[in-house]
Image: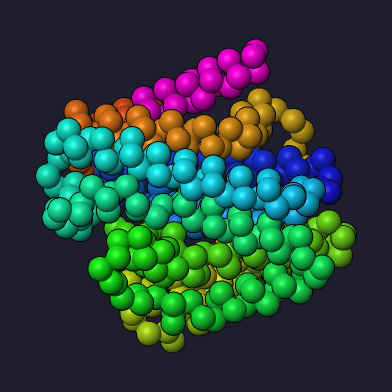
Amino acid sequence: MLTVTESRGVALARGIIVFLIAPIHCVMVYSTPEVKHGPLGNIMAFFAENPGAHLFMFLMGAFVVFSKKKPYKSILKRFLLLLIAGWLLNLIKFVIPHLLHLLPENFYTENYFIQDKYITWRLLFINDILQFAAFAYLVCALIRRSSSPILIACIAGMATLLLSPWMWDKGTTGNLFFNVFVDLLGGFPPKTYFPLFPWLFHCLSGMLFAFLLQKNKLKHSVFVLTGMVLILSGKFIWRYEPGSWHITFFRAGWGGTIFHNGITILWISIFFFIRKNIPNNLIFHFFEWCSNHITSIYLIQWCIIMWLLLLVGYEKSGLVQSLVLIAGTSIVSLFLANTITKKQNSN
């Protein structure tokens, strides 16, 4: 298991990014292109595209290792819950506003949604982070139950990384549900934001990270060095990859995947050091609370942002309005998450 310091370091590392989920999505949805390419947009993009979702997926793999082995029934139940939660979120934030004709027209055009007779189904079955998390959890939990989890995680991780470019864009058929699965493997926005290839690599890397910590095989300084080596290696490989591997941040090639994995490891290692050397304080406790409530904060903020879009408009907010929206959505999301948690605990 993690030491107290390591546990708090992980919570702090994740909690900061959880707190920034609403601000990042506010800029993504509300802000004008000028704001997105300005200082505010660049700051949000840095956290979204570096530690960001890579950190969440890395830690999901790690937590599978830190927790007890789950029976197959529990694994299947959690897989289905995550999958259904993803579809319900799509229903609330996309499908219902679409059916009520409330989404701005430029929302469809800017996100490359084709408004044909299948648009409702496409909006419902967008493969976002929860859908990815469902399948990634299933893979990681099954590996955890195997007789050689470290070896299998290593082999599966390398296979995921190396084979990713050849799993992309496998074409479509007339079967909508088959297309959804193919896109989950290697599609890109707007059909899929987190394809299994290569994002599963981060989860499997998180498993290996957790196994090493659990066995006390390596000191924290070694993880810092590992992160830096991966960052530099990823950048080097990136330069020599085909341009087609760099179409979108959501589907990186070998170099981009290694680079982001290095950022994640370095980010966590830095917070191990911070949590070890700086005493407890209210700021740390706040971010650790955010980490513990990641699911409720994520679901609530998306519902607020997408329904507020009906009033604010897509990509219409300047800098001042963007800052006001960031503050408002963040406060309301945290307040509602806290309120729901208190009610659940009182029952």
- What's the magenta bit mostly, secondary-structure-wise? helix
User: In the visual, does 337 lie left or right of 304?
Assistant: right
User: In the visual, does 278 lie left or right of 163?
Assistant: right
User: In the visual, does 315 lie left or right of 92?
Assistant: left
- Residue placed furthest toward the top: 346
Q: Report if residue 311 is visible in the image.
A: yes
Question: From which residue to which does the magenta span run?
Answer: 328-347
Q: Position of residue 109 (x, y in %)?
A: 15, 53
Rendered view: 200 above or below 119: below
User: Closer to the camera, 326 or 106?
Assistant: 106
User: Closer to the camera, 136 or 54?
Assistant: 136
Rendered view: 45 above or below 275: below
User: In the visual, does 334 lie left or right of 121?
Assistant: right
Judge whether residue 336 is colored magenta: yes
Which quadrant would residue 330 be assigned to in this image? top left
Q: Specify how the rendered protein is coloured.
A: rainbow
Q: Position of residue 88 (x, y in %)?
A: 40, 39
Rendered view: 239 above or below 248: below
